[in-house]
Amino acid sequence: MAYVPGVALLAALVVGCSAGADGNANGADSKAGSPTVTPAPPGKYLTLPAPCRAVPRSTLKDLLPGAAELPAAQQDKVFRGSAAVTYDTDRKVGCSWKSDAPNATRSLSIDFERVVSYDPAVSDDDRADTVYAKKEKAAGLSSSATPGPPEEKDKKGEESGKAKDPADADATDSAGPSPSESSDESTDGTPGSSSSPEEALPSRVLDNLGDAAFLQDLPKQADSTAQRHTVSVVFRTSNVVVTVRYAEQPALVTQVPDGRELQEKAQALARKLAEALSE
């Protein structure tokens, strides 16, 4: 019949179109040698811990002296903490505690931020590192200071073996002078005496805490009569950035917080949180 060749031709066209469609469906690129884009790996953490249960009660008793002396109901309220307001608990959570004792008020807060990169070429870890680096820079610190010209180093004695100029000491490790350097007088007006029983070390980058970490020490402001002293420890582990803030405000303006103790306890808590995250 005359129409048979036409039917055969139509069938051949249909088969050819189907083959072409299958090739596109399989993602085959008609251009040889086209590069294949491999998505960056996701971060280690897909969820965050419950922040108000992240600190053991025994640790809270140490960080919040005076709370253990309260009646049982008030103790429970203090140690329960107050959860931070958040609209996405998979991305950011926090909790805070406060204890009022006769001689001082202590406060503690922790924040967890899980960083997610929406750029397939940038990993969650790299994006989290950028978030952490911004916090470190805002604190006036840098864990990877860019070295200056050789002649500049020679002037400072870094390569020539000469002693550093005291004015240049800790320039890259501190957001500002330590309490003993910022003033030649203590609060009682005695020249050269210490302003607290234990002077706190200056703000600095920390080692052996997560993938990167720093401590920011914030003693009382010069224009404030309150002797409030705050210490922040920020660290990153994989795609999670954690912030610990620990502060003390004495009941009397003549009392000065022990900055070194605040630093030690804030760091100890940060290390416990890092260990718990790695488990």
Image (spheres, rainbow, N blue to C red):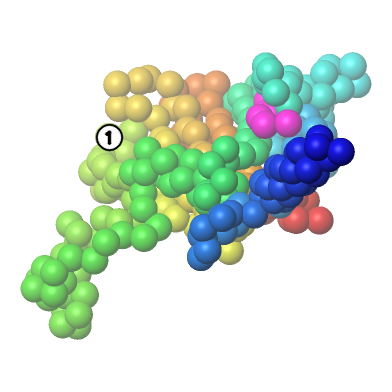
User: In which quarter of the view is residue 18 placed?
Assistant: top right
**Image coords of residue 240 (percent x, y):** 63, 44
Q: Residues within 10 Å of mark 1 (few under 14, many from 20)?
A: few
Left or right: where does residue 224 sit relative to residue 12?
A: left
Residue 140 visible in this rendered orientation of the protein: yes
Q: Which residue is mark 1?
A: 189
**Image coords of residue 198 (percent x, y):** 47, 49
**Element type at marker 1?**
loop
Which residue: 26% across, 42% down? 182
Which residue: 61% across, 39% down? 116
Query: Height in image: 221 above or below 87?
Result: below
Q: Farthest residue toward the right?
A: 72
Report the front residue among 13 and 214: 13
Which residue: 21% across, 75% down? 158
Range of residues picked out in magenta: 90-96
Query: Height in image: 19 above or below 109?
Result: below
Which quadrant of the figure contains the C terminus?
A: bottom right
**Image coords of residue 108 (percent x, y):** 64, 31
Left or right: where does residue 130 sit relative to residue 125?
A: left
Residue 95 inside the magenta-drawn segment: yes
**Image coords of residue 136 (percent x, y):** 42, 45
